[in-house]
Amino acid sequence: MLSKKTKELTTQNDCSLIKKYRNFAFIYKAKGIMDLIQEINKLKKEKNAIILTHCYQRVEIDEVSDYVGDSFYLSKMASKTNADIILFAGVYFMAQSAKLLSPNKKVLLPNLKSGCIMADMIDVENLQLFKNQHPNIPVVCYINSTAEVKALCDVCCTSSNAVEVVKNLGEKEVLFVPDTYLGSYVQSKLPDIKITTFNGFCPTHLRIRKEDIELARKNHPDALILAHPECHKEVSKLADFVGSTKEIMEFSKQTNYKKYIIATEKGVVDRLNRDSKKENWGKEFILINENIICPNMKFNTLECIYETLKTENNEITIDPEIAKKATRCIEKMFTITV
């Protein structure tokens, strides 16, 4: 059962922004999308900058991006780059992670409104209270968390490697923050490890209900249903495949079905349909529900990318002591995973 607060977040969650995103086709007429792309690429070359883009972002941002993917992939790219500037087309915690992994680089976020509701559900005070309630148990934190929270955790994970991280930690019991649904999914894969989860969640993924899966089965009996582990556990149980955004995209490319129902954010569907048409896959990708749009992920536009790269505003800074501890948390993830 979803609480009253959860239902409000999953049904409301900036509906006005979702409406604006649907009308977004007119946003670039004034300057022209091709002009913007050309100007951004020119600035990138002049400033030795790269653009990292999460696959929930507006699909046209890929045209100026150096790397597009999920949080785990982009974290790796941030740690390896020789660029002087990293512009992160994502949300705040992602830009923070890039700064932690490339402390000597200038990291920019195109729009500082690009936060994460899930990440904001836990702060240092709530995390400390959670740890006090379960003393002497290591804490695994989802990368969807602030640097301040990471600094108080033992190891970080992403949806791509959460099962591997918890397994390779070698503990009989762990705490998992902030996403209770990803934590529950990991628990289902590792029944011999006791996982106690914090009660955080992604409002966008919780808009996907059991009834949506059942209706998709009825309307598209020939399709595979692919879901993200941030979904409610009742949704994950009914899906044909559960994986991170990257895993969903790779699975759909490598399997031979002609139709897929995608139970995650709209940006994944946009990219899959674009690539299917461009590369002649002959596959159709259908969003499970038209409202599965993360408003915070859509704040970034080509215009604000251009302005931010031009002015170098919206730079990410992190307290050095917090950064040191949070970086250790992320780096441990890399050391215990393949």
Image (cartoon, rainbow, N blue to C red):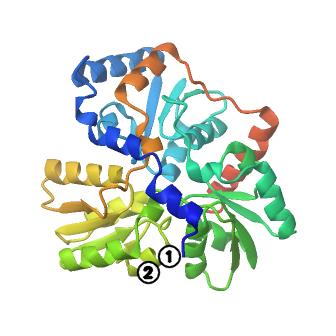
Question: What residue is shown at x 40% (from left), y 40% (from top)?
Answer: 298
Q: Is residue 161 visible?
A: no
User: Where residue 91 sits in the image (x, y, percent)?
Assistant: 52, 41
Q: Is residue 266 visible?
A: yes
Which residue is denoted by mark 2 in the rendering? 237
201 sits left or right of 281 in the view: right
Q: Badge 2: how crowded within 10 Å, few (<14), some, or many (20+)?
A: some
Q: Position of residue 292 (x, y in %)?
A: 37, 56
Circle count: 2
Seen at 31% across and 61% down, the residue is 289
| Mark 2, secondary structure of its residue | helix
The answer to which of 54 and 216 lies nearer the viewer is 216
Residue 327 occupies quadrant: top right
Separation of residues labelled 1 and 2 (CA atoms) = 6 Å
Residue at mark 1: 233
Question: Quarter holding the C terminus?
Answer: bottom right
Residue toward you, 281 or 296: 296
Q: Is residue 333 left or right of residue 282?
A: right
* Left or right of 272 on screen, residue 6: right
Crowding at label 1, few (<14), some or many (≥20) Cα neighbours within 10 Å?
some
Q: Which quadrant: the N terminus?
A: bottom right
Q: Position of residue 260 (x, y in %)?
A: 24, 67
The answer to whether the residue labelled 1 contacts the one labelled 2, judged by CB atoms less than 8 Å apart, is: yes
Q: Amino acid at mark 1?
A: Lys
Is 46 in front, or is 213?
213
Q: Amino acid at mark 2?
A: Lys
Corner quadrant of residue 30: top left
Q: Is residue 216 above or below residue 287?
A: below
- Secondary structure of residue under mark 1: helix
Residue projecting furthest to the bottom? 192
**Residue 319, quarter of the rendered image:** top right
